[in-house]
Structure formats: structure tokens, C-alpha cells
Amino acid sequence: MANLIQAGNGKQIPEGMIMNKYFDNRMNRRNQNVLLATTGGTGSGKSYYDLSMLDSYYFYRFNLPYPIENVCFSVREIMNRLNSKELKKGEMLIFEEAGANLGSLDFQNQISKIFTYVLQSFRSMNIGIVMNLPVLSMLNKSARLLLHAHLITSGIDRDINKCKCKALFHQLNQTSGKSFWKYMRIKWNGKARKIERISYSYPRKELAEEYEKKKFKFVSDLNEGFVQKLEEQHAEEEYKDKRKDLSDVEKEVYDLLITGYSLKEIAVIVEKSYQNCHQTRTRIEKKGYKTKISKNAKKIKINEVEAQIT
């Protein structure tokens, strides 16, 4: 790689060298896992940053490009990929735009479950995961304690097509549970250097195009599902607005119908003829009420009906 990254003292270090060695050291030499979070606002370059970072690592570790299959847009994709038995020791996944299709509370609950599963799997699989989030607070406290590093996007240099991140590495006090986030220090040219910013160029054209196609499909499916829910909600509200009030007799018959009783059973309960109940149901339906229920509906008062019939 001919591109460079910026060290804290202004000296140039080859692009990818720091994170490549960090990933390789944890997963392949120390037999550990890697849990990272990349945060930043919309358009801050965090997605392309993660792609470039892991693409560089894959060429360094496996001499292969980063596979688009390892970019996941949902909890299900993450779990399927972990269970695929296709991942080798040292591989890494990207959880792209985590939480975009989940509510905040559901998101935190599912993320906690993922981290628990991932930690158990990592002990034997040695696989890393990079969480792509707008803000770190989308992870609950327990999940944040498990992170090894937090990459915060700090701008895009569009003149040279590079994205910069402030890289903070997690030091956890095991006694108090207090977290300390610190810059990495390395030995460079015989001196200790503090790395305040790490930069990566835009990802390869082929990888970027594959990512955009996958993201487009995810966003399209998400929007389609959202529109469908809105239409269903609108139709339900419109249906309710069209309904007219029921009489007391009609209300009683309607409640029994939607519970699962037949007209014959209802006639016994309300002490009316079958024909009368049939006419009542017809009036109810003309007023905009649905009286048909699913085949699996339960009769909650079946014993009472049988007692009255006998």
C-alpha cells in the first residue's frame, strides 16, 4: 500500500499498518477476539472507512480482498454468517448501520444477545466484528464494556480522498468497572509515539460498488416494509371511520361472532331464532364490521354453550 496515515506527531506511517498488526496480534497470535465500534454522523465516511480498514487487513492477513458477504445489515445476517461455518480464524464482520431497522429498546436487547453469543464463539473461532453506529450510546452499558476500541470519524479530506478517525482503545478496570479510553502508543523510529488519528483512503472501486448494491437492496426492502405498514395502518383507520354504531343486540351478537361462536350457538345464547341472528349478522356487516375470524380461533365459552344446548 502506497498510501499513508497520520501519526500524532505528524510523521507518516504506511496506511493500514497499525490496525493490521493490531487485528493480527489479537486474533492470530494471542488467540483473542476483536470488538470495535465506528461512530459518526450521516456522510462522515464511517462505512467506507470500515471497508477500507478491513480490506487492507484481509490483503495483509489472507492475501485476499474483503468479501462483501461479511458486510451485514441486520441481526439475522450477523447470526447466519457466524453459523455458516465458512469463516476462518482471524476473519472480521461489519455490522453496517446497526439499529437502522430496529427500535432503540429492541435494538439494545438484541445487541446484548449478539455480544453474548459472539464472545462465546470468539473463544474458539477468533472472529472480529465492527459495529457501525451513529452514536455509541445506542449500545447499552454492558455492551460498551465489551468493546476493545472506539473509532470516531473526524472528517474527510476530499482533496486526497481520505477519511480520518480518532482511534480510542479501551482499558477497563476489572475491579471498579470503570472505562478509560486512550490513544494507542507505538514505537516508531526508536521513539514512543501517540497515534491520535488514523486515516484510510476510499475503498477499492469494486468493493465500493458491491457495498452500494447491497445497501441499496437493504434500504429498498426497509422502505418497502415501512410503506406496507403505513398502508395497512391507514386502511385500518379508514375502515374504522366508516363503521357505524351498533345497537345493543348487534353488539352482543358481534362480540360472540368474533369470539368464534356459530350462529346456531349464538341463537341459543341470546334466545333468538337462527333466522333472526342471521339477519343481525347481515346488518352488522353492512355497517362495516368484519365478522369472519380465522379457522384457528378458540371458543372461550364453548362449555357454557354446550350446557345451554343440552
Image (cartoon, rainbow, N blue to C red):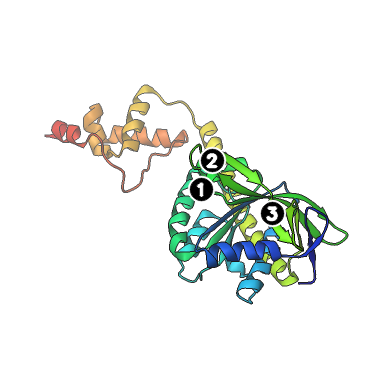
Mark 3, secondary structure of its residue:
strand
Q: Residue drawn at (50%, 36%), measured in percent from left and top?
A: 176
Q: Residue furthest left?
A: 310
**Quarter occupied by the C terminus:** top left
Amino acid on which disc 1 is placed: Ile
Residue under pointer 3: 185
Q: Is residue 190 visible?
A: yes
Sequence-first tag of 2 and 1: 1
Give the alpha-carbon distance from disc 1 to disc 3, as whole Å: 30 Å
Mark nearer the N terminus (1 vs 3): 1
Which mark, residue 111? 1
Question: Percent position (x, y) of residue 134?
Answer: 66, 46
Foreground mark, 2 or 3? 3
| Residue at screen point 81% across, 62% down | 12
Whether pointer 2 and pointer 1 mark residues with C-beta atoms closer than 8 Å, the reply is yes
Q: Is residue 60 above or below residue 254?
A: below
- Distance between the Cα atoms at labels 2 and 3? 28 Å
